[in-house]
Image (spheres, grey):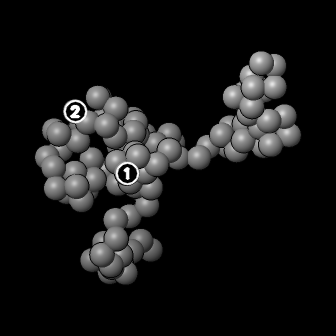
Amino acid sequence: MTTRKRNLVPRGDRPPAFVDRETGAAELRISPETWDRWVTEGTLPASAPGFPEGSPRWRWEDVDKRLTGKVPETPFDMIKAAANLRHGSAKARRREVA
């Protein structure tokens, strides 16, 4: 048996982990059209992978990080950082050569 939406536990005063454009826009107090424009301009990240094309969702953590200027860490970023620990950063290697 499925649970009716009205019987779900309220989420409190935080946005859900994934938001649709209307929920995300409401959270930022902008119109859904502005949300779409910001996604196109790169102000907001692209929608998260794994959702059907007709129902895009955005990971709220990515939206928050993009708007606050924090870069989301990806597995590639962590591997790159680990390589820098072992071999030093490119800037440090250039200093050694000079």
Question: Quick check: can you spot residue 63?
Answer: no
Quadrant (top left, top right, bottom left, bottom right) of the N terminus: bottom left
Above or below for 76 versus 19? above
What mark, if any, has residue 5 been given in the picture?
A: none
Q: Nearer the viewer, residue 68 or 85?
A: 85
Above or below for 39 versus 93? below
Is 14 displayed left or right of 81 in the figure? Answer: left
Question: Quick check: can you spot residue 35?
Answer: yes
Q: Quadrant of residue 8?
A: bottom left
Above or below for 85 versus 9? above
CA distance for labels 2 and 1: 18 Å
Q: Nearer the viewer, residue 39 or 54?
A: 39
What mark, if any, has residue 68 been given in the picture?
A: 1
**Residue 6, x across and y down, in percent:** 27, 77
Mark 2 lies on residue: 37
**Residue 70, x across and y down, in percent:** 46, 48
